[in-house]
Image: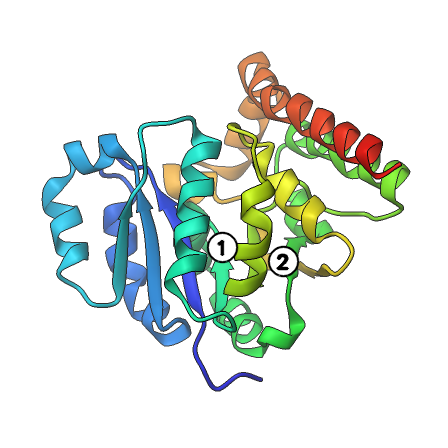
Amino acid sequence: MSLMLPIVVFPLHDPEGLIFPHLETILPALRQAFAQAVVGVTPITLQQRPNQIQALNQDSFFRVIGTPQAPVGAQFSYLYTQAALLNAPQQLLHLCFIDRLAFILQSQHWAQFLQDIQQTSPQDTPMLFVRSKAAWQSHPQNYYAIEQFATQAGQFLFGQSLDFTWCHLAVQASQLAEIMPGVTAQDLSMLAEMVLYLNEVIKVKEVDWLEWEDPFLLSRDVPDLKSERENSVVETRKRLAYIIPTLQALLRYSQNKT
């Protein structure tokens, strides 16, 4: 186990200000688990929430990075590249998403999450934390079925069962710096590209704490929201919109390897 606390890295797109109160609530837990938070703030969030961003800048725990006006995948790539360059090569980075963190650290999962973070050392990386069976059961069925298209394609193409639409990845700064120049997708398929470039060395750990976060964040009844999303053509189209380019990324990678 490393004596050096890891650093958490996440994008922050919150022009409506819905996430900032959660961030304030979970800040003590974040300070307990991480040495610093590297936060990629989108231009519209910076424009709409200047006071909250100023508060982050005044707190030494946060390293605020303004991401460019660009598609979401390019914003993520910029954030991850900067996070890798700003830290020592052996520094352990946890790439994740603030909405997931907000739920995890205010739920029954917080203790297990902190234990898993503390028990992950640089030598364990790259470590892909993936949704367990229990975590997936909390999600709408169409989410699971559509994202499994990519997992199953990866199994057929590479003989590995991986989550290409991941929610949490632990890497050393040097590992991240090595792969990011090759990540070129401008959309969310860049998440798959990252996994593909790490696939020969990546480790996988199933966790329950990647349970579906939306009911908590939206203050909705779980069965009602789950049923609503499962019967929503809009939601299904939304998931297909990132899974189709993800499948194309897997196909390109497979063709280039042969």
x 58%, y 84%: residue: 1
The three-letter amino acid code for the residue at tag 1 is Leu
Quarter containing the C terminus: top right
x 54%, y 47%: residue: 180
Q: Position of residue 201 (x, y in %)?
A: 75, 61
The three-letter amino acid code for the residue at tag 2 is Asp
Vertical relation: 116 (above or below) 126: below
Q: Which mark is residue 202?
A: none
Vertical relation: 50 (above or below) 102: above
Q: Foreground residue, 44 or 25?
A: 44
Residue occupied by mark 2: 208
Q: Earlier in the sequence, mark 1 or mark 2?
A: 1
Residue 68 found in image quarter? top left
* Label 1, residues with CA under 10 Å away: few <14, some 14-19, many ≥20: many
Q: Position of residue 58 (x, y in %)?
A: 13, 61
x 45%, y 40%: residue: 76
Q: Foreground residue, 172 or 111?
A: 172
Give the structural element (helix, strand or loop) at label 2: helix
Q: Position of residue 230 (x, y in %)?
A: 62, 24
Q: Position of residue 117 (x, y in %)?
A: 53, 71
Tell me if 207 is positioned left or right of 253 in this view.
left
Vertical relation: 16 (above or below) 161: above
Q: How is the image coloured?
A: rainbow
Tell me if 232 is positioned left or right of 25 in this view.
right
x 26%, y 61%: residue: 62
Marks 1 and 2 sit apart, C-alpha to C-alpha, by 18 Å
- In this rendering, does residue 109 appear at all? no
Q: Foreground residue, 135 or 55?
A: 55
* Label 2, residues with CA under 10 Å away: few <14, some 14-19, many ≥20: some
Residue occupied by mark 1: 95
